[in-house]
Image (cartoon, rainbow, N blue to C red):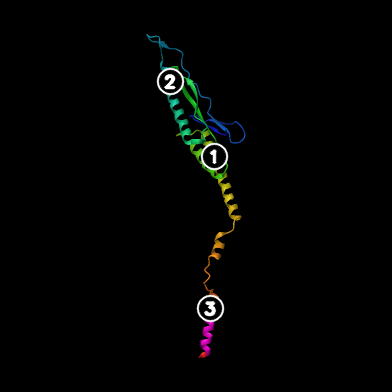
Amino acid sequence: MQGYQANSGEKPPSARHLSAGDKVTLSGESPENIKGKKETKENLNGQEQLNEEDLRILESLKKRDREVRTHEQAHLAAAGRYAGGGAHFTTQKGPDGHAYAVSGEVPIDVGKENSPEATISKMETIKRAALAPQNPSSADRRIAAEAAVKEAAARKELLLKNQEVLLNSPNPSLSQSSSNQPQNIIPAQTVISSYEAIEALQKKSA
């Protein structure tokens, strides 16, 4: 299926083409692993206690996780039926042992449809999906621009199609105007000629 990966991330992502045509992948830069010191302390129960740096890293990971998931959910909700499944996340293990999302992507079909009308409607949806997050990435904006180009091409195709239909079809307004003309209307020239004849007869008799 043709599609692109709608990416989340604070840093500007880069785009790479997977194959010729409409299939592109918007992927973020390699997530920066937030590393902390390995020094930990154990409490009385034998469980590790996080040091201050680990707590800071954990808070950053939690914040990043929320941002990534919100970003991808916005893409997913706006893409509707053009989304190729759910969001995919790259995770990082935190100091507490849990996995947190640090980047994500949503596959979206950006291929042309069978008609210009359908393509126009689809590209409008793709633009909304690409720009749906509060802070679209540079890759998201490139996809929105690409969809706008395809939409413009489809509108041009539709215009040419409609013009061709008009040129190849008879003008119904002209044929209807001639066929619908009432048969009992006397042409203006005939009325004038009759009036002149009556006037001439009146002068003769005088």
Residues under numbered marks 2 and 3 in contact, where contact means CB atoms less than 8 Å apart:
no
- Which residue is found at the position 48% from the left and 33% from the top? 76
Residue designated by label 3: 192
Q: Amino acid at mark 3?
A: Ile
Residue sitting nearer the eye, 18 or 163: 163
Element marked by disc 1: helix
Residue sitting nearer the eye, 42 or 205: 205
Q: Amino acid at mark 2?
A: Leu
- Which residue is found at the position 51% from the left and 41% from the top? 124
How many marks are shown on the rendered structure? Answer: 3
Residue designated by label 2: 58
As measured in the structure, the alpha-carbon distance from the residue carrying label 3 to the one carrying label 1 is: 66 Å
Q: Quadrant of residue 175?
A: bottom right
Q: x, y (%) of residue 140?
A: 51, 34
Q: Quadrant of residue 119?
A: top right
As measured in the structure, the alpha-carbon distance from the residue carrying label 2 to the one carrying label 3 is: 101 Å
Pick out the residue farthest to the left: 44
